[in-house]
Amino acid sequence: MLFGILAAMLILSAFFSGTETALMTLNRYRLRHLVKLKHSGAIKAQRLLQRPDRLLGLILLCNNFVNNFASSIATVIAIKLFADEESAVPIAAGILTIIMLIFSEVTPKTVAAVKPELMAFPGAWIYTPLLKILYPIVWFVNLFVSLLLRIIGIDVKKNRPETLNKDELKSIISDAESLMPPRYQKMLMGILDLESATVEDIMTPRNEVIGIDLESTIDDIISQLKTSPHTRLPVYKTSIDRIIGFLHLRKVLALINLPDFDKQTIISCLDKPSFIPESTPVHNQMQRFKHEKNRIGLVVDEYGDVQGLVTLDDLLQEIVGELITDDDAVRVQSDGSFLVDANITIRELNRINQWSLPTEGPKTLNGLIIEFMETIPEIGTSIKLHGYILEIIKRDENSVKLVKFMSRQ
């Protein structure tokens, strides 16, 4: 009978040890998902975990009682089996310690850590009524625990649900390789980055903006309209700073073959230009485009000078990234190096290659190199740029054009 009682105590000890680990290691986000699906075990587990002090008080109360009772039973068995009581007790204590460590601690806790739901949900069914029965004792114990915790500045009643910041959420998405394709991971990363990105980070620089200069001849303008790869073009006089409006090619191509087609016809088809401060967050500008039913705007600095152009496609590229990025901007070589167009934005380069070049300051790779070198480096110059080793492959009088990234140290 004593051996049977001891075996029952060891089983109960294993149950309390395993369910304690299981409940504490449950994935809280999966638990919330199961609660929304009306999983009864998950609902009870979530209620118990809302007050972890009570749950732990209950589990440890039961576990300590079972362990102490098992120790007493083992002592009685040892005294009955061995004539020498002085040596029997420490032998029994040593044997019981090894048995409890293997069968009541390490094994159930390992199972609970690997498969927490397997033990947590059945345990929640038992702990819920047990907490009601033993609540007075648990309350009395937790009264002293709460006083001790308040001394060190912890109030268990003000326990808040676990939340994640942006960087932690990024880590979760990065670790979800088995759950979603890489392209979806990058899209989610792009969404998370919208808050920190501004239109200045993603705009087409002023020197790369293609538009129609009304000071050009009408024949040159018509030729440009017929061959333009863009559906919307800024129209200006002499300089982009003197912009008149944006021209949608769909409006003008139907009129281009009319005999009286002239510059005034172009002006009559223009839409009012939209100006965007360079510090405008990307997510705000997306809402603005949606509200104004617009798709394009000029980025201006604090003095009102045009710095570049941004479109709705540029904003969407922050989310979909590589789906519309020109693959020629970053080319992997057979030796593992990368040939990179220096006009690429640093944000896009970081996203394509999972690098960590600084995004504060210059927005393009060319600008970052020139800021670092304080000059335009000559072809063949090797640089260690923020831990990345690169070589200048091509340049012109004003900028770096092509760079070879060799390795990172």
Image (cartoon, rainbow, N blue to C red):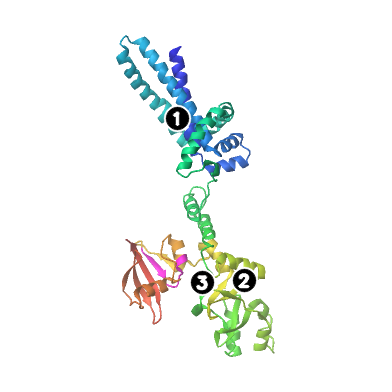
Asked whether 276 or 146 is in front, the reply is 146
C-alpha distance separating marks 2 and 1: 60 Å
Marks 1 and 3: CB-CB under 8 Å?
no
Asked whether 216 or 239 is in front, the reply is 239
Q: What residue appears at the point 47 percent right and 34 percent down from the top-left corner?
A: 21
Q: What residue appears at the point 56 percent right and 74 percent down from the top-left corner?
A: 277
Asked whether 367 or 13 is in front, the reply is 13
Callout 2: SS: loop
Q: Which residue is mark 1?
A: 108
Quarter that holds the C terminus: bottom left
Q: Which residue is mark 3?
A: 200
Callout 3: SS: helix
C-alpha distance separating marks 1 and 3: 56 Å
C-alpha distance separating marks 3 and 2: 16 Å
Please report whichever mark, 2 or 1, sits nearer to the chain's N-terminal start: 1
**Residue 271 falls in image quadrant:** bottom right
Q: Position of residue 156 (x, y in %)?
A: 52, 41
Q: What residue appears at the point 32 percent right and 12 percent down from the top-left corner?
A: 85
Please report whichever mark, 3 or 2, sits nearer to the chain's N-terminal start: 3
Indicate whether 53 appears above or below 262: above
In front: label 3 or label 2: 3
Q: Which residue is mark 2?
A: 295
**In the displayed structure image, the side of residue 358 where residue 209 appears, left or right:** right
Residue 342 falls inside the magenta stretch:
yes
Range of magenta residues: 337-347
